[in-house]
Amino acid sequence: MKWLVSTQVALLALALLPTGCGDDEDDTGAACDEADQCYGGLDTTQLEGEVRCLSDNVPDGYCTHTCNTDDDCCTVEGECGAGLEYVCSPLENQNEKFCFLSCEGQDAEDYCQSNISDAFSCRSSGGGSQNRKLCLP
């Protein structure tokens, strides 16, 4: 009986853990499999670009949206983490640009890990002449 109660408590605790995109207060950078998992609770028509889940280039996916300039990022309340700088950058020489958490001018490793995940670090976007320093896995 004791084992059954412990198992039920453990299963309940797992069920209450936030999972995937849309459960976080800040959604840019959250994990995803497809775009419709991103920005839950936000009116995505208000975002400055098309919602994307970057799952081909980023393990476990990355919720973001297209952009043209840095000013296109974090225009909607709840889109990004408070007090964090997001930038518009191509990823690995793609033609399109996306919003990412910037680690330019930061204590890179600690900054990325404490603001997104232990699996993230500060690295080059690989964006050629538009290269930026981003928090990515």
Image (cartoon, grey):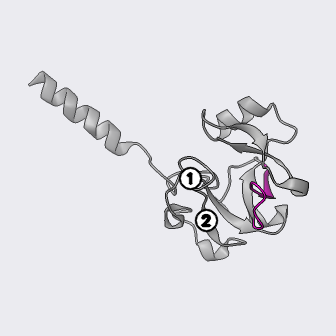
7 vs 66, nearest the viewer: 66
Q: Residue at x 72, y 43 (%)?
A: 135
| Placement of the N terminus among the 4 image quadrants | top left
Which region shows up in magenta? 85-96
- State whether residue 11 is above or below residue 51: above
Q: Can residue 76 be seen from the camera position used here?
A: no
Q: Can residue 1 be seen from the camera position used here?
A: yes
View extreme (top): residue: 2
Task: Indicate the amino acid at tag 2.
Answer: Arg
- State whether residue 19 is above or below residue 77: above
Q: Secondary structure at mark 1?
A: loop
Q: Residue at x 78, y 47 (%)?
A: 102
**Residue 49 part of the magenta-drawn span:** no
View extreme (bottom): residue: 45
Q: Secondary structure at mark 2?
A: strand
Quick check: 36 left or right of 86? Answer: left
Identify the residue under disc 1: 61
Task: Identify the image quadrant of residue 103.
Answer: top right
View extreme (right): residue: 129
Identify the residue under disc 2: 52
